Amino acid sequence: MSWTEVVIEVAREHAEALSDALMEAGALSVSVEDADEGTDQEKPLFGEPGMVPTEAAWEHSRVVALTDLDADQAVIVAEAAQAIGLATPPQFTTRNVADEDWVRKTQSQFEPIHIGKNIWVVPSWHDAPDPDALILELDPGLAFGTGSHPTTRLCMEWLEANPAPGKTVLDYGCGSGILAMVARKLGAGSVSGVDIDPQAIESARDNAERNHCEIDYYLPEDFAQSAHADERFDIVVANILSSPLKLMAPMLSGRVAPGGSLVLSGVLARQAEEVAQAYAPFIKLSVWAELDGWVALHGQLQQGS
């Protein structure tokens, strides 16, 4: 089976509305791209992981709509233009899209990832390169954290360099649950994960089951009602973003047991000092490592605190 893509270049103020209208007019899917991609005017539309872009589209946007091969593309574009109040339908080009094994093509983009000294993150359709390594079977999904981002790598490398057999670990902002699983596979005793996203919690639980890891995952409100509600942990790791990390300084610091460690990432190198200052009243943090402009901060709570 084949399809036809309709390609329309529009101003930013029309991109989102036109996308919705094309779907209503019969398009199968719609995406918005930077029309200046590959030129000096190309502009990235993203910030830190998990942040929503402040703009919904590019100044010069390219709307790409997938349609059935036998659809009347001119009618679809005309209906969409009328629906959003454009006086005349925008000009468009078309291009054929041949049928492919999309699952296989998508899977081919994801290879096993080697992290630290002995950790491999392996998609389910690959064999582990080193069966004797610490293997995490993890498929790319909706929850953040597959080991590909520098912040996730930094936290995983810290956990590998500081194994804590039998100790308690809290992964706050757990996403896919990858950090909690690393801690568990490295011998940690009780491991808990918390995330505000129900879909992340569902994903983390599925991943833990697949990797034979006994981990408790909670939404914050459930965590507050759990047996861990007042617990202080030997290791607290939070890979989130600098702004929420600063706001959560009293709470996260209060979760660290005396003599325990706090590990933070999701922090750009230029943000390290201000994040450390937010935690200074509770625990002294310093940069443990840096990778591609991101840092992991680490500190140890003094005994008796």
Image (cartoon, helix red, strand yellow):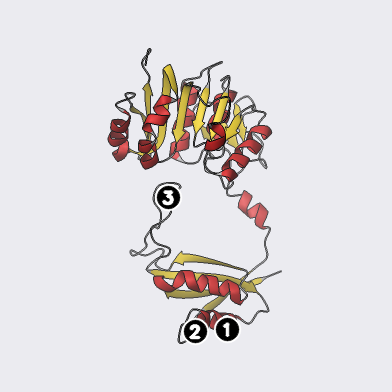
Work out whether mark 3 precedes mark 2 in sequence or the reverse, and give the earlier one: 3
Q: Do the residues under discs 2 and 1 have CB atoms within 8 angstroms?
A: yes
The vertical placement of 147 against 79, above or below, is: above
Q: Position of residue 127 (x, y in %)?
A: 67, 36
Numbered label attached to residue 51: 3
Q: Nearer the viewer, residue 199 or 116?
A: 199
Image-quadrant location for residue 9: bottom left
Name the amino acid, label 1. Ala
Q: Nearer the viewer, mark 3 or mark 2?
A: 3
Percent of width and height locating residue 69: 66, 76
The residue identified by callout 2 is 89
Q: Quick one: SS at disc 1?
A: helix
Cα distance between the residues tagged 1 and 3? 36 Å
Name the residue beneath numbered marker 1: 74
| Residue at disc 3, secondary structure | loop
Write down the quadrant of residue 129 in the picture. top right
Secondary structure category for the residue under label 2:
loop
Q: Is residue 121 left or right of residue 125?
A: left
Name the quarter where the C terminus is drawn. top left
Kind of residue at disc 3? Met
Q: Is the residue marked by circle 3 packed among few (<14), some (14-19), or many (20+) residues within 10 Å? A: few
Q: Nearer the viewer, residue 252 or 102?
A: 252
Res. 119 in view:
no
Q: Are marks 1 and 3 in contact (CB under 8 Å)?
A: no
Residue reaching furthest front? 225
